[in-house]
Image (cartoon, coloured by chain):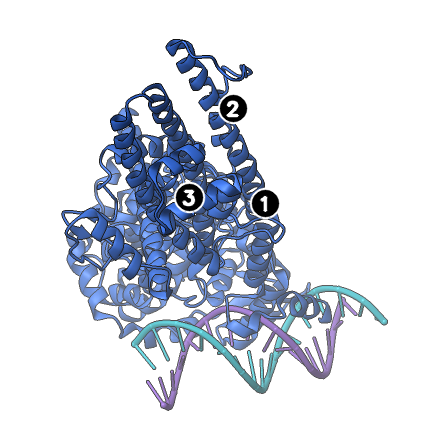
Chain colours: A blue, B purple, C cyan
Amino acid sequence: MMQESGTETKSNGSAIQNGSSSGNHLLECGGLREGRSNGEAPATELGAADLAHVQQQQALQVARQLLQQQQQQQQQVSGLKSPKRNDKQPALQVPVSVAMMTPQVITPQQMQQILQQQVLSPQQLQVLLQQQQALMLQQQLQEFYKKQQEQLQLQLLQQQHAGKQPKEQQQVATQQLAFQQQLLQMQQLQQQHLLSLQRQGLLTIQPGQPALPLQPLAQGMIPTELQQLWKEVTGVHTAEEATSNNPSSLDLTTCVSSSAPAKASLVMNPHASTNGQLSVHTPKRESLSHEEHPHSHPLYGHGVCKWPGCEAVCEDFPSFLKHLNSEHALDDRSTAQCRVQMQVVQQLELQLAKDKERLQAMMTHLHVKSTEPKAAPQPLNLVSSVTLSKSASEASPQSLPHTPTTPTAPLTPVTQGPSVITTTSMHTVGPIRRRYSDKYNVPISSADIAQNQEFYKNAEVRPPFTYASLIRQAILESPEKQLTLNEIYNWFTRMFAYFRRNAATWKNAVRHNLSLHKCFVRVENVKGAVWTVDEVEFQKRRPQKISGNPSLIKNMQSSHAYCTPLNAALQASMAENSIPLYTTASMGNPSLGNLASAMREELNGAMEHTNSNESDSSPGRSPLQAVHPVHVKEEPLDPEEAEGPLSLVTTANHSPDFDHDRDYEDEPVNEDME
DNA sequence: CTCAGAGTAAACAGAA
DNA sequence: TTTCTGTTTACTCTGA
């Protein structure tokens, strides 16, 4: 006895504190966090710092080389002598681009993987994303910096070339000065942004490393150049000074500022680029265009500041910049707004990913023979579950692997799409109501396998049923309707990947439930003690809840006209169990069908109470199916499923909408009906 | 706010 | 003695 509790205690030590689902959860989180901090994130951060520095140096060097080259060319063209013959590198641009492409930024794929692994809490994800954004930004900065340098070089060369034409030179210089000032302003803004990120710990900077974002960049520049730059910004220097002294001091800013806001989407969108390349190039172009149209700024449009929630009117671009600096400087408010925006982007991104999957599934479905008429029926549209479940089920198979041991897709619930379901609905889970919301993410199983059972067997997702329900299910599923404790354990582990972990915790819970609920009767057997289910008792505990949630009932009733067989009690019970919400919102998994049977069991109780004769309407099952119209698979059930209780979907499916259920008809039906 | 249901942790006892 | 099984209590969280 002590063994279990001992282990449990240890492993769960802190679990009690926050009441999170379990110690495991905490452990997982801890592990994840650790993994993140020691694994990916650190690598990223470290690499970011290092690489950034190196890149800066490279960029600077390349820029200089370019300048030299250009100078040489110019000189050659103009017949001037080049002071130095430094022709080492005709192909220097290659290194630059290569450097720029350094994959410190987590690729979309990686990001997705992280998401799917559910290893990170939303907060962690956000932080990670922001870090990535910062890194991307940094890269973009560098890229732009180089670009600007090149351009500056060109201008300088032109000046030199046209040195005899003071007028032109002056003009160019003036232009440059203005441009630089603008750029610097933006740079400042960017700096503020990055600093705010740093301040919030969103952007990690290695202690030994120079500050990441801009400072390293700055350091990458020649200090004197930097100083010069700042002088230009703060003081009044002649354009000649600026240009002549700092060829390389041209700025990164324009692009920075312009790309900064856009970076979020770039980073967030897994399809935007595969390795960050795109994000690197895009800003480049943007920067150019900005040069031409300095007044285009993501945060500025139609004379209005587009900072979220601002909409301040700015006469012109300079005033906008002024406004930006003053009103949206680095402070708590801006920081918070930035976070919110990031979250918005993140959610949109997830939404997009989901929709893409859906699209893919749809296309696949249309291309492949569509032998699945059932998808159409969409029987019970409980709380818009159809939308979700359908989309989920149709999601392309490849999209989500059924890795047994890996945590399931962590897609945040928020991304559930346009459906009614929101994050909050996630928390309105059925029987196992609390703390598991994070677990109830949307593990999209392949359409082919739309078997809940299969899903739970492989995915470490906590089943949305109470221990009592599961225990009952296990017992009823057994040939003799009785199981030893150990057999119950085995059933749990066999049927649910989730219960392959934290044995101590859930086993204790199982024992606790067996003892606690009168519906579980211990019977002395020859071999020892076995547990049976007292249906009467089991059902006794149901009715109480049935009263609740009229809205759901209504919804159910209205949504499935063809589901007439379902009686009010059933509906009520379904509503009571929040099945729709639960399955769709929290689970988002269309493939829960089989498991639904477990739920159905619970429902049965209520059903039987009110409607003893309509057993064939298989009360329990319909709700479940209703929730998972997708199930409808014509594919034969998995062998394993057949044995499993989950697959037993009850008796008759007289109602048309339950066509898909036919597959299950042969299944052992009814153990629960007794 | 209260209450009930559920999950978790833990202590304890008895049996194998 | 250790491990498993079973009971019980306490606490927390959540939803009604």
Please give the residue where the numbered disc 3 appears in the rendered image.
Answer: A229
Q: Residues within 10 Å of mark 2 (few under 14, many from 20)?
A: some
Determine whether A331 is above or below A111 in the image.
below
Mark 1: which secondary structure? helix
Q: Residues within 10 Å of mark 3 (few under 14, many from 20)?
A: many
Please give the residue where the numbered disc 2 appears in the rendered image.
Answer: A95
Mark 3 or mark 1: whose residue is earlier in sequence: 1
Q: Nearer the viewer, mark 2 or mark 3?
A: 3
Mark 2: which secondary structure? helix
Residue type, label 1: Leu
Label 2 chain ID: A
Q: Picture quarter containing residue A584?
A: bottom left
Choose between A339 and A113: the one closer to the eye: A339
Residue A351 badge: none
Q: Position of residue A458 (x, y in %)?
A: 51, 45
Residue type, label 3: Leu
Residue type, label 2: Pro
Q: CA distance from mark 2 to mark 1?
A: 21 Å
Residue A46 badge: 1
Q: CA distance from mark 3 to mark 1?
A: 28 Å
